[in-house]
Amino acid sequence: MTPVVLAARAVPAAWWDLLVEPWGYGFMQRALLVTVVASVVAALLSCWLVLIGWSLMGDAVSHAVLPGVVLAYLLGVPFAAGAFLFGVGAVALIGWVRATSRVKEDAAIGVVFTTVFAVGVVLVSVTPSQVDLSHILFGNVLGVSDADVWQVVVLGAVAAAVLVLRRRDLTLYAFDRVHAQVIGLPVRRIGVLLLGLLAVSVVVALQAVGVILAVAMLITPGATAYLLTDRIWRMLWVAPAIAAGCAVVGVWASYALDVASAGLVVVCQGLAFGAAYVTARVRHRRAARAGRPGKALAARR
């Protein structure tokens, strides 16, 4: 064979090796499993967060868990326990400030989550630790242990199961709370349930991408699916599919490019949103030119 033919055959083989090689390592397998589970759970929840308009609430909870994680480390208890307690506590504090003052919800969220997050940053800076607590901020998915994997899988499975089983109630709550109350649904309990699931999802995402990037996983997949379809049941398929795909591509690409896994997963989600935005705009313009305002509206929604 000529050198040209040998080189041509070597290129596909090299690419195949690069595609397969990362998954032969245990730490990459654990990283992929944790990231996919966290992405899918967060994507499911993000559909309702986007519809209700609670994206900023997801931001608040994801940042408010930081001091809980540090205190959990100091007390020697699982990080998930501290993160969950502080996430729920932050939501309760936001509700209390909003109910007992003239401050509006967005301002209450901004004040509470920035203050609690700042407390967490201070605790990280003064806490003597043999463990690098900065990975709580930015994620350390390549360093997760078997115990972390089990924690993420169990919490993720519980959160996903509740979201799927209560999807009809959550959807009615998102679109028409008055109607939901009239037909006898416990609207207040549904809201509390959704906030509790938000805290659980943040704990799950914390292991994969850290506090700062967890908010992206709680918003971007739902927003992307919202651009592509105007049916909630389709969103519940599209958002997790996009999130899982971005998780696989991001983790693999982080190995190939030797860059941060968590950041690259979120970048992939951002690129998916950009592609969905362009697709929605093109679809809207075509529908408008064809004189189909109904389809134009659907494209915009």
Image (spheres, rainbow, N blue to C red):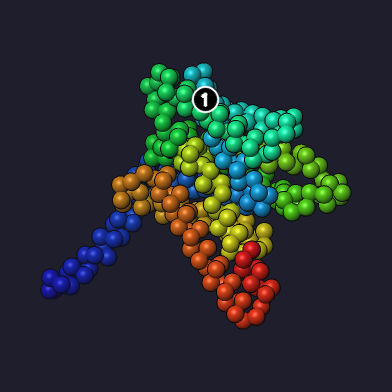
Pinpoint residue 4: horizontal percent, then vertical percent.
Answer: 15, 72
Residue at coordinates 64% horizontally, 40% vertically from top-left?
A: 106
Q: Is residue 1 above or below residue 109?
A: below
Residue type for callout 1: Val
Extreme residue toward the left, this view: 2
Mark 1 lies on a secondary structure that is helix
113, 33: nearer the viewer? 113
Q: Is residue 2 left or right of residue 301?
A: left
Near-viewer residue (33 or 24): 33
Q: Position of residue 180 (x, y in %)?
A: 81, 49
Answer above or below: position of 217 versus 288: above
Pick whichever, 291 or 22, lies toward us: 291
Q: Residue beneath label 1, please?
A: 119
Q: Residue at x 36, y 44 (%)?
A: 260
Query: Where in the figure is residue 62, as x and y percent of width and height?
Result: 55, 37
On the rendered image, what quadrant is the N terminus found in? bottom left
In the depicted structure, whether residue 98 falls above or below residue 173: above
